[in-house]
């Protein structure tokens, strides 16, 4: 149980285009999901906390107009990278708080974004 | 300095024990975690320990917590090549809404 999926696993896009990444909790309802960005040889950087039915809470330094987060249902959150540039290339990982709102987080497999 | 620190690399021979160390700064940490990340994949929770515990063992994994020194370690017994991965230490606090703060990860390389 407690499986989180992400789609796509890899995406390559041209500079200036927008890319949407989906995060789904497959067998549980997740009222809270999290989006992280991971740089090579670096830790995970929390970008935003996404609560179902409300606006996401962004961490300091993360552009909310650049990284649009929507959490429209209890099993789906999306991250849209708008007008992507090469510096947005990264590994994006989502996680979901476990069933019944426990403190444990379950992580998706990540999405590798490459912007040409 | 960083809130959670780990050494970046560890190399061991197959069959030996691996010990990955982590230090943290927040004395109000409630849970401490070890995650494993294989190449190109997300994070897999290996084990976690509550801050009022000193030790937790789960098959080949042993977690030791020294709360006084804010030091956490993960010991992998009989390390196998399949254990090669990046291991992240993380901590959560109740004041931080239990959102983990991660270290930079230790890259474990197991060679035959």
Image (tube, grey):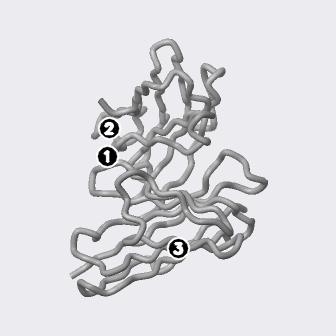
| Label 2 to label 1: alpha-carbon separation | 6 Å
Which numbered tag is attached to residue B109? Answer: 1
Q: Are marks 2 and 1 in contact (CB under 8 Å)?
A: yes
Which numbered tag is attached to residue B12? Answer: 2
Badge 1 crowding class, 10 Å Cα cut-off, few under 14, some 14 to 19, many 20 or more, is many
**Residue B79 visible at all:** yes
Q: Chain of mark 1?
A: B
Q: Nearer the viewer, residue B83 or A38?
A: A38
Q: Secondary structure at mark 2?
A: strand
Please give the name of the residue rendered at 49% of the width and 39% of the height, measured from the top-left corner. B90
For mark 3, what is the residue? A6
**Residue B85 visible at all:** no
- Picture coordinates of residue B73 (x, y %)? 46, 28
Q: Are marks 1 and 3 on the same chain?
A: no
Q: Chain of mark 2?
A: B
Q: Secondary structure at mark 1?
A: strand
Mark earlier in primary sequence (2, 1): 2
Please give the name of the residue rendered at 54% of the width and 38% of the height, measured from the top-left corner. B33
């Amino acid at each position: 149980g407690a499986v989180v999926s992400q789609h796509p696993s890899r995406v390559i896009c041209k500079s200036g285009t927008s890319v949407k990444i989906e995060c789904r909790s497959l067998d549980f309802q997740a009222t809270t999901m999290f989006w992280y960005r991971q740089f090579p040889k670096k830790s995970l950087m929390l970008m935003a906390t996404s609560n179902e039915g409300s606006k996401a809470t962004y961490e300091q330094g993360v552009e909310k107009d650049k990284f649009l987060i929507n959490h429209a249902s209890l099993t789906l959150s999306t991250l849209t990278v708008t007008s992507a540039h090469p510096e947005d290339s990264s590994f994006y990982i989502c996680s979901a708080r476990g069933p019944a709102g426990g403190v444990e987080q379950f992580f998706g497999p990540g999405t590798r974004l490459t912007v040409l | 300095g960083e809130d959670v620190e780990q050494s970046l690399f560890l190399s061991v021979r197959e069959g030996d024990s691996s010990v990955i160390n982590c230090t943290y700064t927040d004395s109000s940490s409630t849970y401490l975690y070890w995650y494993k990340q294989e190449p190109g994949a997300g994070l897999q929770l290996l084990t976690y320990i509550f801050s009022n515990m000193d030790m937790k063992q789960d098959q080949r994994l042993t977690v030791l917590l020294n709360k006084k020194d804010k030091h956490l370690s993960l010991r992998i017994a009989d390390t196998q090549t399949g254990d090669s991965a990046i291991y992240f230490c993380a901590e959560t606090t109740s004041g931080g809404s239990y959102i983990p703060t991660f270290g930079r990860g230790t890259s474990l390389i197991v060679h035959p």
